[in-house]
Image (cartoon, grey):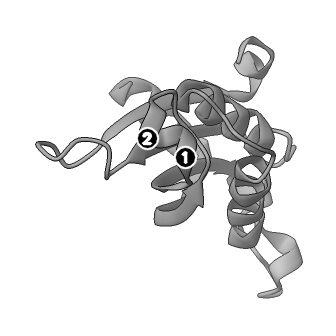
């Protein structure tokens, strides 16, 4: 992964979103089926410099962070989701739908499931070429 990221960073700018939290209807345990629970999302987008180097200091020259937040929010509002893997993959696909994004890393976690650990979660990394395999 380090070599791949180093290769991406030669040609791409890394944009990130950290600690984005939403209440999500997710999980398979009885207590998870009763009410939404807190989820935290961390995202890295790898965007080629051609799509992330503004020349006129305008928002339409870059990938807007609102796109990331809106994509996650929209996918979390589609109804109950059983597995984090399902949601994490859907978010990766949704972010790669933006043709300016070359690669994405998505991490989801549920911080309130177990009292004896900080969180349980899932992480995926996808390249544009591999997007159809998500």
The residue lying furthest to the top in this view is: 133
Residue 128 spot, x, y in % from top left: 74, 28
Residue 23 spot, x, y in % from top left: 56, 61
Q: Look at the numbered disc 2 and give the secondary structure of its residue.
A: helix
Q: Residue at point 77% right, 87% down?
A: 57
Q: What is the C-alpha distance between the residues marked 1 and 2?
A: 5 Å
Residue 127 visible in the snapshot: yes
In-image side of 92 versus 99 (left or right): left
Q: Are marks 1 and 2 in contact (CB under 8 Å)?
A: yes
Residue 10 visible in the snapshot: no
Residue 8 spot, x, y in % from top left: 54, 37
Q: Which disc is residue 56 wearing?
A: none
| Residue where numbered disc 1 is placed | 34
In-image side of 102 versus 24 (left or right): right
Q: Quadrant of the N terminus?
A: top left
In-image side of 8 versus 101 (left or right): left
Q: Which disc is residue 31 wearing?
A: 2
Q: Look at the numbered disc 1 and give the secondary structure of its residue.
A: helix
Q: Quadrant of the C terminus?
A: top right
Q: Residue at point 68% right, 64% down?
A: 69
């Amino acid at each position: 992964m380090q070599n791949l990221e180093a290769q991406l960073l030669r040609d791409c700018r890394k944009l990130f979103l950290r600690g984005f939290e939403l209440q999500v209807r997710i999980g398979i345990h009885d207590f998870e089926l009763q009410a939404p629970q807190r989820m935290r999302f961390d995202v890295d987008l790898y965007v080629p410099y051609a799509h992330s180097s503004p020349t006129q200091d305008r928002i339409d020259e870059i990938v807007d962070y609102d796109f990331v937040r809106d994509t996650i929010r929209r996918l979390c509002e589609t109804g109950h989701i059983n597995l984090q893997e399902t949601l994490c993959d859907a978010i990766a696909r949704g972010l790669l739908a933006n043709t300016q994004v070359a690669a994405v890393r998505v991490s989801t976690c549920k911080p309130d499931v177990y009292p004896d650990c900080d969180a349980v979660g899932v992480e995926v990394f996808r390249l544009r070429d591999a997007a159809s395999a998500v």
